């Protein structure tokens, strides 16, 4: 295939520039460069170490005199007693006492901790050996009770292996533990500026885990960078053994902050910092000083970084727009240095760290694209004029898609190019456009058509031409496609896309798309024959309530005959008692007890076997047979509920009501079913779909009010899949909303479904409605819904639909706690 370089170079140049800069931005070069600038800014913030922070090191001298580590906790108790007598203000023990020793030694240490009263103990996360999961190493209970506070000593290392950043709050599952140094500072009355940190950080750790999709269970929030006062031995140090044996000057610890930790070779956790390598206790001393002096550096949150970069980008674009024609190359250096200047100012003035390298790369990309744009502008004007002429001759004036003639030409060219290849013509009629034109006018209809054209173009590959062959039809030519399944998948995706609500004058409108498909050469070898067969299949799809997609085939007639045969059998099913009700439990999300059952109809055909409800229910609604079937379901469900009630099983019975049943006779039928079976009205719940509610809002409300007057409960079924609107929802006397299983199915893997489910729950609670979620199949889904206070659950996780004799044992087992 010959590539037209002249046609692609205008796009190739900026795309190449953006990709190269993007690679630099995503590479370690960018991150290491940011660390370089951070260290450079930090070098300008020298400060001395505080005199009131003292370190007691478990050093080589102490190891030589006291013997091999670890030492008895009786030694630590003696040390604490000495420090208490010496007047130490705060003592931070940078060591973890998670395992018991001897009762006497542990008791002595606990007493020494309690005696001082302001001892801070350390805790840390530890890998469990199962994936990336962590657990907490906590001090023994007696130590924890005696301690003044506890704090974590977890430190993150940057890519260059240096420690610059810590998290002020962390913990397993929730950030309940302060940083060890923060806990020390808080003993002195230090108060962290939570509002400022929360504003700047925006839950940094949660954003990072959401991006990577990985979680260890160890939750960390409120990151800060540490401005180091000095390296190893910069703070005043004393040897552990000297303090233990009172070989220190009098008053050395009076009113001081004392940090105890390992500094011996091979014993301590040596951390590399931008200054030098230092022991962990020295690192903590730097953090304590930074917090007490409020000199910690707050990293700008990813969201604010993005906003700042966007602001710089917009400013640069405005400057280039106004001055590029005359001063383009003079602007290069100032634009490139602007992120560095802003980063330095934020660091120096506000103690905020903004990583500048990606912004520098962005500025470079903007400048290079602006330079390219200047060179390309004249050529583009000529190209635009040519495109306008070509558009008028070959494309639809509204959507700018190929018209009928262009489509015919495309099909003919495809046949000529590869007469033995296989391709498909997909013809789409959105459905419902006429009512939009009637209600809102032709201009609104044109806007909907433009939106549909955009959706179809974005949903299919560029190799599949999209056209508008008629006023209400669109088409997609799927070229070089041998897989019928793939063609069907594309068609189904288009159907799902077009079924999404569209906004017209502030109102959500739903289309009813139909798709017909003809395949070359199976369904015709001539262009017009292929188009005609696609239209035939499309009209079949419009009249077939079971499917929105229809392939043209010789079996269409057989399908019509099958539908007729099924309809005849369906008319005889009720008199022949071929229907049976199955029941699926509805459980309380907190206790797990069964509080209700949903009655679900099943058809046992003597020849066909078990016929799927998805096959015969739409046919029953199309033919009106649903009225008789629905009446039988209502009566049978009430009879069964009354029978179980007589056996001591007081369970709410939920019955689905079709939109066709929702008429002026419904109230009388419900009242009769309750009276005949002597069933209390509050034991019956009617599940009504959104489509049933919007047929006649005034009549619907009156009917619902009458049903509520009977005492019957009312649930809105499959909420979120139809005509969801608060404008009518809040006016109807409903008891609960039922979240459709399409949202529940992937709410733990799809953030959009989770957001929708959460929005439904919050909205329902704001309207004082209960919520039941159907289609719960996994414990993860159950836990998510429980965490969002969804009151009731239903799905295969608890039980599949079962016949009456089998469901009773499930009820008794769950409600008895088995």
Image (cartoon, helix red, strand yellow):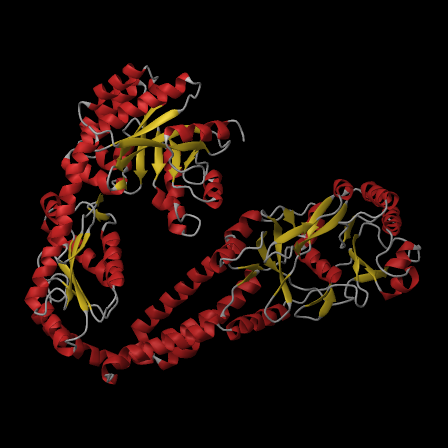
x and y percentages locating residue 695 in the rendered image: 18, 34
x and y percentages locating residue 310 in the rendered image: 39, 64
Say left or right for 283 vs 550: right
User: Which of the two residues, 81 or 414, is positioned nearer the viewer here?
Assistant: 414
Say left or right for 242 vs 1: right
User: Which of the two residues, 273 or 757, is positioned nearer the viewer here?
Assistant: 757
Compared with 581, 266 (above or below) is below
| Residue at 34%, 41% in the rendered image | 740
| Residue at 12%, 64% in the rendered image | 523
Q: Can residue 186 be seen from the camera position used here?
A: yes
Name the quadrant of the C terminus: top right
Compared with 136, 637 (above or below) is above
User: Which of the two residues, 89 or 166, is positioned nearer the viewer here?
Assistant: 166
| Residue at 54%, 74% in the rendered image | 33
Residue sitting at the far front? 607
Quadrant of residue 600 in the image?
A: top left
Give the mark count: 0
Name the quadrant of the N terminus: bottom left
x and y percentages locating residue 395 in the rendered image: 11, 67
User: Which of the two residues, 91 or 67, is positioned nearer the viewer here?
Assistant: 67
Quadrant of residue 412 in the image?
A: bottom left
x and y percentages locating residue 223 in the rendered image: 58, 56
Q: Can residue 459 be seen from the camera position used here?
A: no
Compared with 42, 98 (above or below) is above
């Amino acid at each position: 295939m010959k590539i037209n370089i002249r046609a692609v170079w205008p796009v190739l140049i900026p795309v190449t520039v953006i990709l190269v800069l993007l690679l630099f931005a995503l590479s370690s070069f960018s991150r290491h460069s940011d660390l370089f600038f951070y260290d450079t800014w930090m070098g300008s913030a020298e400060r001395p170490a505080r005199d009131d922070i003292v370190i007691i090191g478990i050093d080589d001298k102490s190891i030589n005199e006291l013997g091999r580590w670890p030492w008895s906790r009786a030694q630590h108790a003696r040390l604490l007693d000495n420090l208490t007598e010496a007047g130490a203000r705060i003592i931070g023990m940078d060591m973890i006492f998670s395992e018991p020793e001897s009762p006497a030694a542990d008791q002595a240490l606990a007493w020494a901790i309690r005696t001082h009263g302001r001892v801070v103990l350390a805790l840390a996360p530890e890998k469990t050996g199962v994936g990336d999961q962590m657990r907490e190493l906590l001090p023994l209970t007696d130590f924890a009770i005696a301690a003044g506070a506890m704090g974590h000593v977890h430190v993150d290392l940057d890519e260059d292996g240096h420690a610059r950043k810590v998290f002020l709050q962390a913990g397993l599952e929730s950030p309940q533990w302060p940083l060890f140094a923060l806990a020390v500072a808080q003993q002195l009355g230090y108060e962290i500026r939570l509002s400022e940190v929360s504003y700047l950080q925006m839950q940094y750790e949660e954003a990072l885990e959401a991006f990577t999709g990985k979680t260890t269970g160890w939750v960390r929030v409120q990151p800060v960078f540490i401005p180091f006062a000095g390296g190893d031995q910069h703070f005043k140090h004393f040897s552990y053994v000297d303090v233990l044996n009172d070989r220190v000057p009098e008053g050395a610890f009076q009113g001081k902050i004392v940090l105890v930790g390992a500094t011996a070779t091979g014993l301590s956790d040596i951390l590399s910092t931008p200054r030098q390598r230092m022991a962990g206790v020295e690192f903590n001393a730097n953090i304590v000083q930074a917090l007490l002096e409020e000199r910690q550096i707050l990293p700008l949150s990813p969201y604010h970084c993005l906003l700042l970069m966007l602001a710089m980008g917009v400013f640069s674009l405005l400057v280039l727009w106004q001055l590029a024609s005359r001063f383009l190359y003079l602007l290069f250096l100032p634009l490139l240095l602007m992120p560095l200047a802003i980063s330095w100012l934020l660091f120096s003035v506000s103690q905020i760290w903004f990583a500048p390298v990606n912004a520098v790369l962005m500025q470079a990309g903007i400048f290079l694209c602006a330079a390219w744009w200047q060179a390309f502008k004249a050529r583009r004007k000529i190209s635009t004029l040519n495109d306008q002429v070509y558009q008028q001759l070959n494309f639809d004036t509204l959507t700018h898609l190929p018209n009928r003639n262009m489509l015919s030409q495309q099909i003919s060219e495809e046949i000529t190019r590869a007469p033995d290849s296989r391709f498909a013509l997909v013809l789409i009629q959105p459905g419902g456009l006429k009512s939009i034109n009637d209600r809102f006018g032709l201009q609104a209809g044109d806007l909907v058509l433009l939106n549909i054209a955009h959706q179809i173009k974005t949903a299919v590959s560029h190799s599949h031409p999209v056209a508008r062959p008629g006023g209400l039809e669109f088409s997609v030519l799927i070229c070089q496609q041998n897989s019928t399944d793939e063609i069907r998948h594309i068609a189904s995706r288009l159907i799902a896309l077009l079924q999404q609500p569209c906004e017209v004058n502030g109102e959500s409108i739903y289309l009813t798309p139909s798709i017909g498909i003809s395949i070359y050469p199976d369904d015709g070898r001539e262009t017009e024959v292929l188009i005609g067969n696609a239209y035939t299949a499309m009209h079949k799809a419009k009249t077939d309530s079971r499917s929105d997609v229809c392939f043209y085939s010789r079996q269409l007639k057989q399908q019509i005959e099958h539908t007729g045969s099924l309809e005849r059998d369906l008319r005889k099913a009720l008199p022949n008692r071929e229907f049976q009700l199955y029941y699926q439990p509805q459980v309380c999300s907190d206790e797990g007890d069964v509080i209700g059952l949903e009655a679900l109809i099943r058809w046992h055909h003597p020849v066909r076997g078990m016929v799927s409800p998805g096959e015969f229910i739409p046919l029953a609604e199309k033919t009106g047979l649903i009225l008789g079937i629905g009446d039988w379901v209502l009566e049978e469900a009430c009879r069964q509920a009354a029978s179980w009630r007589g056996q001591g099983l007081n369970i709410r019975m939920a019955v689905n009501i079709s939109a066709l049943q929702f008429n002026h006779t419904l109230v009388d039928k419900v009242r009769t079913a309750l009276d005949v079976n002597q069933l209390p009205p509050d034991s019956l719940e009617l599940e009504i779909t959104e489509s049933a509610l919007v047929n006649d809002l005034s009549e619907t409300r009156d009917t619902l009010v009458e049903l509520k007057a009977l005492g019957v409960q009312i649930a809105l079924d499959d909420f979120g899949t139809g005509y969801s609107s608060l404008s009518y929802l809040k006016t109807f006397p409903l008891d609960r909303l039922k979240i459709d299983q399409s949202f529940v199915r992937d709410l733990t893997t799809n953030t959009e479904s989770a957001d929708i489910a959460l929005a439904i729950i919050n909205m329902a609670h704001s309207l004082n409605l209960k919520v039941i979620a159907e289609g719960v199949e996994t414990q993860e889904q159950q836990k998510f819904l429980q965490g969002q206070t969804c009151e009731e659950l239903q799905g295969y996780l608890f039980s599949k639909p079962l016949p009456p004799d089998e469901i009773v044992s499930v009820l008794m087992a769950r409600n008895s706690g088995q």
